[in-house]
Amino acid sequence: MALGGIAACSTEGDFVSEGVSAGPDSTLTALFPRDVAYTPATTPFRLAYTLTDAEGVPLRELGGPLTFTVSFDGEPIGDPVEVAPHGDGVPRPYLPLPIEFPRPGIYDVETEHDGRRLNSQVQVFPAEEIEQPLVGQDLPPVPTPTTTQAFEVNPICTLNPQCPFHAHDLRDVVGQGTPVAVLLASPAYCSTTVCGPILDLLIDEAEGRDDLLTIHSEVYRNPKGVRDLSEALLAPLPMDYNMPFEPCLFVADGDGQLVARGDIVIDRVEIAEMLDLVS
């Protein structure tokens, strides 16, 4: 899906799988948008990858940590990074690569699996060209539907039963002294199988956190009033943040500064780590 149809989809309904070319063995596959300005330079960032088989289907097991090298014009940037697979509570394992690119351009991302070198490329843009909030920036105070103010979003939550994260409007609480976690996800209408589990995981991990305000935003304003989701209007947060994908978890400190962002797929371990940054 693109804006006016947000996306995080694959042929198997598990993850986004962009630009996969079938081959005889596994392929290193990006689980993030490749057709928009997504990846920034000079900013700490997280790129999610997985391995897919010859038909482009994500592998069910990755077998252990993989070592990534990232290079620009044939020259490595930084040291190799060992990335352990994640998959606690989500359908398929994935590899979250932490990275900070020194400049815009096209980079090679490589790893090795079963004795084969696997390569993927990523285009990196100037940070000012990225429209979504980035780590280190202030999280914009946009409206999020609550049980008392829906902002024409119906339903305000498609989890059944409704999740407990609709008591606060982001505009009223971000930057007001208490850390905030905001999840953009549509459990009933997400074209992957990750939105529902991620919201469930966030419910578990945020339970008992009196030092944290947690908010859930649906993607669509009127999903039941249209024949096809491509015709649905976007809810305020994905519209104002110009989000071309879901799900996405934003975590901001008490001053409203974004300290972590998890896109497309986030397991229980990563969610806990993100929330611990503001504990």
Image (cartoon, rainbow, N blue to C red):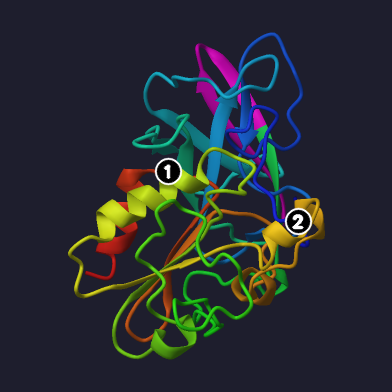
Q: Is residue 41 magenta?
A: no
Residue 86 vertical position relative to residue 175 in the rendered view, above or below: above
Report x, y in % for residue 71. 62, 42
Is residue 11 visible in the rendered image? The answer is yes
Mark 1 or mark 2: name the one nearer the start of the chain: 2
Q: Amino acid at mark 1?
A: Pro
Looking at the picture, tell me which residue is in the foreground, 214 or 154: 154
Residue 266 visible in rendering? no
What secondary structure predominates along the stretch shown in magenta?
strand
Where does label 1 land, which residue?
Answer: 197
Is 114 within the magenta?
Answer: yes
- The image shows residue 194, relative to residue 59, as above or below, that is below
Residue at 44 percent across and 19 percent down: it is 61
Asked whether, in this view, residue 22 is left or right of residue 196, the answer is: right
Task: Name the residue beneath numbered marker 2.
Answer: 5
How dense is the environment of label 2, judged by Cα within 10 Å: few (below 14), some, or many (20 and up)?
Answer: some
Range shown magenta: 105-119
